[in-house]
Each structure stands twice: as structure tokens, then as C-alpha cells.
Amino acid sequence: MAEKLTYLCFFLLLLYRVKPQDDARPLLDEFSGGFSAAGNNMSLDGVAGVDNNGVLRVTDFSANSLGHGFYSNPIQFKNSSGEVMSFSTSFAFAIIPQPGIQGGDGMAFAISPVKGIPGGDSGSYIGLFNATNNGNSSNHILAVEFDTFNNVQYGEPDGNHIAIDINSISSTKSTPVMQFKGNDTNGIPLNLTSGQVIQAWIDYNSPTNQLDIRLSTDSAKPTSVLLSSKVNLSEILNESMYIGFSAATGLAASSHCILGWSFNVNGDAKSLNLAQLPKLQLPTTASTGTKKNRRGLIVGVSVSCALAVILLTASSFYVVRRKKMADVVEDWEHDIVPHRLPYEELNKATRGFKEKELIGSGGFGRVYKGILPNSGTQVAVKRISQHSKQGLQEFVSEVASIGRLRHRNLVQLVGWCRRQSDLLLVYDFMPNGSLDKYLFDEQPKTILSWEQRFRIIKGVASGLLYLHEEWEQVVVHRDIKAGNVLLDSEFNARLSDFGLAKLYEHGSNPSTTRVVGTLGYMAPELTRTSKPTTRSDVFAFGALLLEVVCGRRPINPTASSEELILLVDCVWENWTVGAVLDVVDPRMEGKFDEDEALLVLKLGLICSNYEAEARPTMRLVVRYLEGELALQEEVVVPNKRKGDGVGLTVEFEDYSQSIPTTSSVYDVYGRSAVGR
Ligand SMILES: *[C@@H]1O[C@H](CO)[C@@H](O)[C@H](O)[C@H]1NC(C)=O
Ligand SMILES: *[C@@H]1O[C@H](CO)[C@@H](O)[C@H](O)[C@H]1NC(C)=O
Ligand SMILES: *[C@@H]1O[C@H](CO)[C@@H](O)[C@H](O)[C@H]1NC(C)=O
Ligand SMILES: *[C@@H]1O[C@H](CO)[C@@H](O)[C@H](O)[C@H]1NC(C)=O
Ligand SMILES: *[C@@H]1O[C@H](CO)[C@@H](O)[C@H](O)[C@H]1NC(C)=O
Ligand SMILES: *[C@@H]1O[C@H](CO)[C@@H](O)[C@H](O)[C@H]1NC(C)=O
Ligand SMILES: *[C@@H]1O[C@H](CO)[C@@H](O)[C@H](O)[C@H]1NC(C)=O
Ligand SMILES: *[C@@H]1O[C@H](CO)[C@@H](O)[C@H](O)[C@H]1NC(C)=O
């Protein structure tokens, strides 16, 4: 109560200070000429900063980062009768893409109940939301986003749009970016990531509930509205709110700059005179040199100049690199999305690829732990060697495409590098290693509890669903197994090595058909068709489900002929005699949720069906796991396997011919048995 009173007094004081009889009462115009003088009244977090010229740089070129720049004082949005008042804001911004890389994620003007949006995530959440709170009406966040990345999973139209977000990154309304000039009614296409200074006007009219957004590269407010929507903000905004900017980068980065800002309640905000704004400087790059020593070299340049400099730097960057480091860079590579890292940096990060830093090795190469010298981030560097020159271009574009996959249950590819015949892939480091260690080691570091196991299962399912159905292309993982499920610091599951199997083929002789996969996880139809499908991934996922519950490998190669070789048979046998819970990993000492364990075992059996068509899709699997659909007892049908012609032993031998038996070596970053 006392707090509210203080705010109210503060507000009244402000109104008083700015002459109440004046129609256009600029509640906040101290930033209309930039942020330098007023830096103290902005509260910044993440990578946000105000540069010497007075430009608020919400993000720089660092990958996977975010920044917030909020006005430090709260703003009163409701009047004494509790109704939302009209408000208006205008600001000038510029989005400068990192040289040679397409776009970052975008930025937003946001109204939030707390300063700076503490729970916001980088990447596609652009610092506003996270996977947990996205869509929750308790967020009380209204944002207008300037989105430069096409997130198909949120139904976005393209990688250059503006939208209204209410409590969720899935926008209520969006439109491709256009600008209008003066009284013109014809829109002119506008590129957000062109580095131009763009002015935006956002006006909310409370009697009509109308929210209008305009854009122009001029100082004058255009008549035509670009995006207009009716929204009743009374339930969304609290009485006292904070206003500011949020921006984020993912694999690709852009520097999101705000050059000037004005805001007003119950009156129009002052339009900014673009000629009087601070000049943009070339931002620092995360991958070249530390912030400090780069800042010293920077010269103030105008926007057009800045772009010229960017191009120049980019080209000299590559020329120098080509000579000095002998990285092989070809023209088409310049357009590739994921961060291309200098070889020197990776060499330094892994201390010259020292044996001591080796954390795994397998079919695809060796994996080293490293610390990037500039940012200090821990990474896993996978070194893939012996590539034939043929197919290299496909290889790299494939890297680019898998690099654009983003999901909380996928290990993020943060960069790559090519030198001679080596290809280096750089991933987020997963401190808890791979799932198989916890399931199959005689003496694992920790025994995973049921809660952890169930969360891991749901995580893998969600990641796989994204690969199969939620991305722009269908991605078949082809090598789902415990060794390819990595665990982050909180034991959340992250799938690794997606797309790699396919990548590997690009470098191989096309006349030999490779059967890719791992014994025990390979769907039976693969030996017939050698065509991996989403259904064969589901088969492998089924094997994984059973393993996680039972704590055993899908095959037991040392089993005597009377013992059951396949885990699925063992579970099925117990199922038929009504004692399926007997297979649950005894190391949990009976501490598990019986309903959940039963659900997972049933799902495991269904997914392991020998008939590909009888297996559920990942979307169904996720719905079962989330309890949205109940799994009927009769769904579990026996596998047609024994004595029906599709002989287990025959296929087993088929596998062992095409794949070296590898059960003894399981490593941190996934060993893929690739038939050679
Ligand atoms: C911060 O805001 C207050 C109130 O609007 C203003 O009086 C003060 O000058 C501002 N401080 C700075 C450093 O600009
Ligand atoms: C509060 O705002 C609403 C909508 O603008 C208006 O109708 C009402 O009269 C205002 N109440 C007061 C006490 O100013
Ligand atoms: C915003 O308002 C809602 C309900 O009106 C309340 O539950 C919530 O705590 C408020 N948030 C803040 C940060 O004051
Ligand atoms: C998501 O954001 C909320 C704040 O809205 C925060 O409490 C929560 O910890 C965040 N969750 C994650 C997983 O970051
Ligand atoms: C929304 O967030 C609140 C508070 O963080 C939480 O109690 C509630 O369960 C969440 N609702 C949903 C549907 O996730
Ligand atoms: C736009 O129209 C208004 C009134 O119709 C007029 O006053 C103004 O001068 C026009 N602006 C331009 C740039 O033509
Ligand atoms: C926008 O401009 C950037 C940088 O000049 C360019 O890379 C990109 O292709 C442009 N996007 C569109 C949609 O024209
Ligand atoms: C907005 O919604 C609230 C209730 O949710 C209602 O009381 C109010 O009249 C609405 N305002 C307008 C302008 O429609």
C-alpha cells in the first residue's frame, strides 16, 4: 500500500512538473536525443550497455545472449478508477546483422510488471519469456516484437515481421514489415536487419482498446498504420509497470540498438528527429577479440558508413583468415548461418586438441572439451576427420541447416570450423555427460531417481517431436540411443548428433549403402529398405524408454541361448504374465510412481512394434506422456516376431554383418556404429 502511494505521488509529481494544461505531456522524453546523459535512469542487464555516443545497445554480436534496457522507474498505467489509460511511445532503432551471418533473433518494446524480465530466455524467446512461463497469463507482459528470425513453430510468417505478443511469444497478430511515409497509403517494404535507423510509434487508445503500430525511416509520424489490433489491456497490465526493450541472439547474432526514445501517458509521445540522434558505432564482435581492446579501435561512423565498414571488415576478415590460418573458405560459405569460428580459437580452446581434453571418441570422430578463449564458455568440440572433398558443400550447408534447429531438448550447435580435411563442430558443453553412463555403468556417479528418469523421457520425446514435426523440415535423427542423450547441469535431457548420420553420408561413396544406427535400436524394416523414417526413430525411442525404466541395455550380447537377448522380449514376457513392474530398475529400490512407470513400459512396447505403421507418432507419444490422452490396455498388442517368418535371429545376424559390434565402447558424445 505504502509502495503504491509512493508511485502515485511520484506520478502526480511528474504530471505537475510537466504543466498539466499542456496537451502533449511528455512523461518521459529525457532519452529523445539518446541515452548518454540519462544512463543512470536506465536499468540494464544481460549484454546490454550504453556506448560512448549514447546508443543503447541491447545486444552485441555475442551468440546465444540477451539484453534488457528498462526505464528504472515504474510507470502508472491505470487511473484512479482502475482503468488502463491511453499511452504512446516512439523510439528509433537499428538492427545491425553480424557480418557474413544472417540475422539474430529480434527485439521488442515491452511492458512488464518487473524491471528487466528476469525469466526471459535468449534465442527465439527474445528475452521476454521462457519455455516454462510462455503463454501463462500470470506473466502480465505486453510486447511489440521486431522479429528477424522465422520461427515456424510459433506460426510466424517470415523472418522480417512485427507482432503483438501478449504473455506469449506466439503472437496475437503479426505482419511483414513495411514502412509508410507522410500521408502515403502505399507501404514500402522495409528490411529490419538492414542496419538502417527506423522509427517506430506505438499508440494505445484506451476508450477504443486500439493498439496501433507505425514504422518509418523518417522523423515525421506517418498517417498509415502498419499493424492495428483491438486489445483490452485491463487484465494484462497491472497498475504499475516497467517499460523498456528486450533483445536476444541465438546462433546468429545481430546488434540491436536503440538511438532515442520518448513515452507518454494520456497524450502523444514526441516524434524523434532522426537527425539529432547519436551516431551508430560498429559494434564489437563476440568471436573476434575481447570487448575492451576492440572498443579502442572503434571510430564513430554514420549508419551508411557503418555498413560499408562492416562489409570491408568482413571481407578483410576472410582474406586475412584465409592466408593466416589456412582455413578453407569458399564464397558460398559466407552465407551460412551457424557461427563460423576461427581454427586458432578452437585450437586454443582445446589446448591444441590435447589428449587430456578428450572426452569421447566414436564413429564420427573425437570429442574434446574446451573453453572458448574470448567468452570463457565451456564447449564440446567434435572433430570429424577424413572427409572426401566430394560432397563437402552439402556437408557444410547441412551443418548450417542443423545449426538452425533450436529446442531446449537439443544440444545446441554453437559453431563450426573447417580446416583442410577436418571439420570441427562446436556444441554447448553438457556437464553431466551421457545418459548411458547412468543406466548401464556398474557404479554410476548417481542413481537417477524416477522423477529424473521421467523428466528425461519427456524431454527426449519433446526434442524428437520438434525434429519430426515442428521444424520447417522433417529431421529424422536416425541414431536415438542413451549414448546420444546428454544431460545438462540440471539433468535435463538434450538430444545430440541429430542430422549427423545424414551428414556423414555426404562425404561417402554414394554407391555403398550405409546402414546407420546402433544395434538394438534399429527398426527391423531398416534392413529391408535402408530408408530411415520418423517411424524408425520411434522404434529406437521405444528401446530407449525400456532402458530408462529397466536400467539395462536393449540387447544383452552375453546372454546364453535360453536367456532373452532383447530387452523388449523380456518386458513383453513379464507383461503377459501380469508382472511387468518386476522389470523396473532395482537400483531405484522400489521408489517410483507405478502409474508413470507402467505408462512408460506400455509406450515402450507399443513403440517397439515390428510393424512400422503400428507405432504411434511422436505427437501421440508426447500426449500420452503428458497425460493428455489415456493409454488403453488393449493398445498394447503383441509383437509379431517369433515364429511368424520375421525371424529375430536372422535379422540380428543381418545387423551384425553391416555393423561392427560396439557394445563395449560407449562414450560421452555418442558413439554411432556406422557400417563401413
Ligand atoms: C532521472 O529521472 C528523474 C525523474 O524523471 C530526473 O529528474 C533525473 O534528471 C534523471 N536522472 C538522470 C541522470 O538523467
Ligand atoms: C479513467 O480512464 C477511463 C478510460 O480512459 C475514463 O473513462 C475514466 O473517466 C477515467 N477515470 C478517472 C477518475 O480519471
Ligand atoms: C499483477 O497483477 C496481478 C493481478 O492483478 C497480481 O496477481 C500480480 O501479483 C501483479 N504483479 C505484480 C508484479 O505486481
Ligand atoms: C521462467 O521465468 C520465470 C519468471 O517469469 C522464472 O521464475 C522461472 O525460473 C523461469 N524458468 C526457467 C526455466 O528459466
Ligand atoms: C502460470 O504461472 C503461475 C505462477 O508462476 C503458476 O502457478 C501456474 O501453474 C502457471 N500456469 C500454467 C498453466 O502453467
Ligand atoms: C498530410 O495531410 C494533412 C491533412 O490532411 C496535412 O495537413 C499534411 O500537410 C499532409 N502531410 C504531408 C506530408 O503531405
Ligand atoms: C536484409 O538485409 C540484410 C543485410 O543487408 C540481408 O542480408 C538480408 O538478406 C535482407 N533481407 C531481406 C528479406 O531482404
Ligand atoms: C475491458 O475488460 C474489462 C473486464 O475484463 C471490462 O470491465 C472493461 O469494460 C473492458 N474495457 C473496454 C474498453 O472494453
Image (spheres, grey):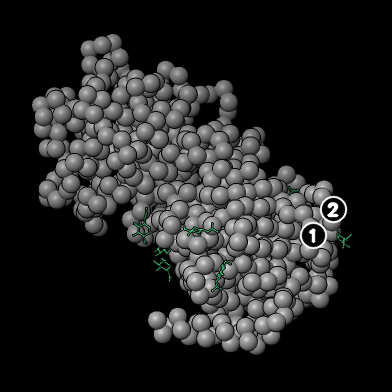
Image side of residue 240 versus residue 230, left or right: left
554 on left or right of 377: left
* Residue in the foreground of this view, choosing between 469 and 87: 87
Residue under pointer 2: 184
Which corner quadrant of the image does residue 299 belong to? bottom right
Q: Is residue 592 visible?
A: yes
Q: Residues within 10 Å of mark 2 (few under 14, many from 20)?
A: few
Residue at the (26%, 17%) spot, across then down: 640
Name the side, left or right, on which 321 lies relative to 573: right
Relative height, residue 58 to residue 528 (above, below): below
User: Looking at numbered disc 2 in the image, what kind of residue is underneath it?
Assistant: Asp
Number of other residues with Cα within 10 Å of mark 1, as a class: few under 14, some 14 to 19, many 20 or more: many
Q: Do the CB atoms of the residues marked 2 and 1 lie less than 8 Å apart? A: yes
Residue 308 place in picture, x, y as percent? 83, 62
Question: Can you identify the residue that label 1 sits on?
Answer: 222
Residue in view at x 41 percent, y 85 percent: 2
Identified by mark 1, the residue type is Pro
Residue 469 sits above or below residue 225 on the image? above
Residue 391: which numbered mark, if any?
A: none
- Image quadrant containing the N terminus: bottom left
Residue in view at x 54 percent, y 67 percent: 84
The spot of residue 393 in percent (x, y) is: 66, 39
